[in-house]
């Protein structure tokens, strides 16, 4: 069926849809898809041409009035805080299920951003005037909120970066270049996000260090036995995800850290998919470095953070040079500030840091334990309903009493291309999911495919969202099966 151009019946008659095979590389067809999807958006059935409309207050009020608060799930009670969720997409109500890519933002975060720009926009750490003092206080307060959210011992252990990717690059270029030498080994898993692989490839090229990858074991999860066998006195660093953005699996970080420390190796934890969803305690994990991104945890884009143990950060050279990261500058050399300033060259993302602080207030107000247990319920509900879809392959472990899964599923159905699934769900049903390799090409290769569809939930989603998605997915599959 690959490459076949079909004329769709009824409302689809205005456009052509090219079916794709999941084993074809995503980058090979993205231009085809763009070309074929634009008529789909513009012509024919009015469902495809209705403009986006935000009617948050009206629909929110109606939703809240019509239900008894006691019987409402966390998803129902928090949805009103997210204006973006209350709109129509392509003539259907929006069902946003792409939370592993980025989360939506509650009103309190939007207000914090607006308030910063309206009331005290100013540069930090350099002005003596009142606005600058207020901006500096709020920026530093945000740092303290992050520290306390992940139970860091000291706010100085939190470095603000643009995102998790930059945080990993900071460790790679600062700690990595200063500490790695030829034949030193870095252990990673094949399930890492590209952000956690590529910086280390670049640093390995410059230092001669060697990357060793833990492969997938039972249930598509990185094999802990492999981890154990890979350690040696050459191991200097482990780079590992906490929760996989594709497999939904959760790795036993404490155990991995314990092993690594026995060999004198450091551990960098990519906590992008765990910090937004569960209690993460860096002291309990004993992680040396940990990174996360604000935009996946209800905060703004443009800000993320690196946690590093203070003795490690204090011994690390600067990553970027410029204003604010110095102690003294002479014409021939400079001396550097202590962390965190040493690693925050130039004007930082002030409003965004403050917005992240507001997101942490919001999440803490609900409680991460509550968020996690609700998401566990959603995760099981999603998995159980999804696995009933004929010909589906869901990647990662099945949830059991002993195996925890995050509230996301990556999957393929027969030979229907995941991008076709995602496009149809969006255009026909207003359901937003992701398709592609999810920045995890080595993992997809290990799974034997080039791409997958991924549905990912957050605490503002409900079981009704899952029901709607499953119904829409079955409709999508019937549609594509009708051409066989
Ligand atoms: C597991 C994981 N690591 C790293 C990243 C990179 O995050 P960012 O793009 O915000 O730097 C992501 C984002 O999708 C992720 O899911």
Image (spheres, rainbow, N blue to C red):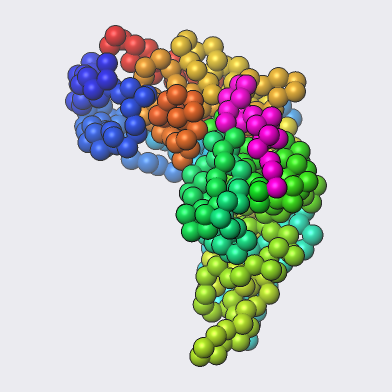
Q: Is residue 214 visible?
A: yes
Q: Nearest the camera: 87 or 218?
A: 218
Please determine whether, in this image, residue 28 is positioned above or below residue 342: above
Q: Nearest the camera: 168 or 72?
A: 168
Looking at the rendering, the stretch of residues picked out in magenta corresponds to 215-233
Residue 361 horizontal/vertical position (percent): 69, 54
Rendered image quadrant of residue 81: top right
Residue 199 horizontal/vertical position (percent): 50, 53
Rendered image quadrant of residue 412: top left
The question of residue 436 being in magenta is answered with no
Please determine whether, in this image, residue 77 is positioned above or below residue 110: above
Look at 54% across and 36% down and name the residue there: 190
Q: Would residue 405 appear left or right of 432 to someone viewing this image?
A: right
The question of residue 218 being in magenta is answered with yes
Q: Nearest the camera: 292 or 298?
A: 292
Count the marks.
0
Q: Is residue 102 visible?
A: no
Look at 53% across and 32% down and name the residue there: 246
Q: Would residue 216 appear left or right of 451 to someone viewing this image?
A: right
């Amino acid at each position: 069926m690959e490459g076949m151009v079909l004329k769709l019946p009824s409302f689809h008659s205005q456009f052509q849809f090219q079916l794709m095979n999941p084993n074809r590389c995503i980058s090979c067809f993205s231009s085809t898809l763009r070309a074929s999807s634009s008529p789909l958006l513009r012509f024919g059935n009015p469902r495809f041409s209705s403009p986006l409309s935000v009617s948050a207050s009206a629909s929110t009020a109606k939703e809240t009035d019509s239900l008894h608060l006691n019987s409402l799930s966390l998803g129902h009670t928090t949805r009103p805080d997210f204006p973006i969720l209350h709109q129509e997409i392509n003539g259907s109500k929006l069902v946003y299920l792409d939370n592993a890519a980025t989360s939506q933002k509650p009103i309190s975060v939007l207000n914090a951003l607006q308030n910063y720009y309206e009331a005290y926009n100013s540069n930090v750490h350099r002005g003596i005037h009142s606005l600058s003092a207020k901006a500096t206080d709020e920026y530093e307060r945000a740092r303290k909120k992050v520290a306390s959210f992940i139970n860091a011992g000291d706010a100085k252990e939190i470095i603000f970066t643009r995102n998790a990717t930059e945080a990993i690059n900071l460790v790679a270029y600062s700690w990595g270049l200063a500490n790695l030498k030829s034949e030193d080994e870095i252990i990673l898993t094949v399930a890492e996000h590209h952000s956690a692989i590529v910086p280390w490839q670049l640093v390995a090229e410059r230092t001669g260090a060697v990357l060793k990858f833990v492969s997938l074991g039972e249930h598509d999860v990185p094999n802990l036995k492999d981890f154990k066998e890979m350690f040696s006195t050459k191991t200097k660093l482990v780079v590992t995800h906490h929760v996989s953005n594709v497999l939904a699996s959760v790795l036993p970080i404490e155990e991995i850290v314990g092993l690594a420390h026995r060999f004198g190796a450091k551990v960098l934890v990519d906590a992008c998919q765990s910090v937004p969803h569960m209690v993460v305690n860096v002291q309990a994990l004993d992680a040396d470095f940990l990174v996360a991104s604000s935009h996946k945890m209800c905060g703004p884009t443009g800000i993320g953070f690196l946690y590093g143990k203070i003795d490690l950060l204090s011994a690390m050279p600067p990553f970027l040079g410029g204003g604010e990261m110095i102690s003294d500058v002479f014409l021939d050399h400079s001396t550097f500030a202590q962390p965190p300033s040493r690693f925050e060259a130039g004007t930082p993302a002030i409003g965004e840091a403050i917005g992240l602080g507001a997101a942490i207030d919001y999440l803490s107000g609900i409680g991460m334990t509550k968020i996690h247990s609700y998401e566990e319920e959603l995760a099981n509900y999603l998995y159980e309903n999804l696995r009933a879809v004929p010909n589906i392959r869901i990647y990662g472990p099945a949830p059991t009493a002993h195996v925890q899964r995050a509230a996301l599923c990556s999957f393929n159905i027969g030979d229907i291309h995941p991008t076709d699934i995602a496009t149809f769900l969006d255009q026909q049903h207003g359901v937003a999911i992701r398709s592609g390799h999810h920045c995890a090409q080595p993992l997809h290769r290990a799974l034997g495919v080039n791409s997958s569809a991924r549905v990912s939930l957050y605490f503002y989603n409900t079981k009704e969202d899952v029901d709607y998605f499953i119904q829409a997915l079955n409709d999508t599959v019937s549609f594509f099966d009708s051409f066989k």
